[in-house]
Amino acid sequence: IELDYDKIIADTYLLSEGISFSKFKKQLDKNFLLIKQKFKEHPLSQKYSFDEILIIGSLLEKEGIDYEDKRKIYSVIMNRLKLNMKLQIDATVIFALTEGKTNLERKLTYADLKIKNPFNTYANFGLPPKPISYVGNKTIELIFENYKTDYLFYFYNSLENKHIFSLSYKDHLKKLNEYRSKK
């Protein structure tokens, strides 16, 4: 039995000792359907399929540090999709390079950002074709909050261990250059 990122909701599951894998799989499937059903009537579900919601969720799982960070990154993703901007998410490039099977043991290069791969959101518009990780129930709930900001850009500041968000490319470059000068 193959387990896919787009068929399982990451969550805490209580299992009885000796439970068979097929019973566990049924529990996973039931949880997936319950969560999918829970948001079926949500306005966001009219615009995005549940598969697309899972893709967005996987981007948040890989990029976001904590709940607030994921909320802001979610808003950037939605703003960029609305404006038909490339998402330019590093985690998608890493997934394209590793197929999600290993960690990338180096920093991304500019050449990496140009690789031709359907998961590379620097090279392609829109969402990747499938999720790049499992998505937790809390992240799905966060998505359906539909948190809004006007942010269009962000980068990770390793000195402060947080993402820095900007409204404009000019402001983004200014903050990025300030950060790089301190490194």
Image (spheres, rainbow, N blue to C red):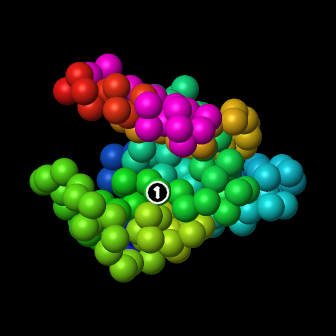
Q: Residue furthest left?
A: 105
Q: Nearer the viewer, residue 133 or 168?
A: 168
Residue lying at 12% horizontally and 53% vertically, measured from the top left: 105
Q: Where is residue 167 drawn, in percent x and y?
A: 61, 35
| Pointer 1 local density, CA inside 10 Å: few below 14, some 14–19, many at least 20 | some
Q: Nearer the viewer, residue 43 or 17?
A: 43
Residue lying at 86% horizontally and 51% vertically, measured from the top left: 43
Quadrant including the C terminus: top left
Residue type, numbered disc 1: Gln
Residue 110 seen in render? yes
Q: How many marks?
A: 1
Check the image and report above or below for 92 versus 66.
below
Q: Where is residue 177 drawn, in percent x and y?
A: 34, 32
Residue of label 1: 88
Q: Nearer the viewer, residue 158 or 111?
A: 111
Bounds of the magenta span?
157-174
Is 67 part of what is drawn in magenta?
no
Q: Where is residue 80 drawn, in percent x and y?
A: 64, 53
Is 172 part of what is drawn in magenta?
yes
Residue 83 left/right relative to 62: right
Residue lying at 14% horizontally and 53% vertically, measured from the top left: 106
Quadrant including the N terminus: bottom left
Give the quarter of the image for residue 181: top left
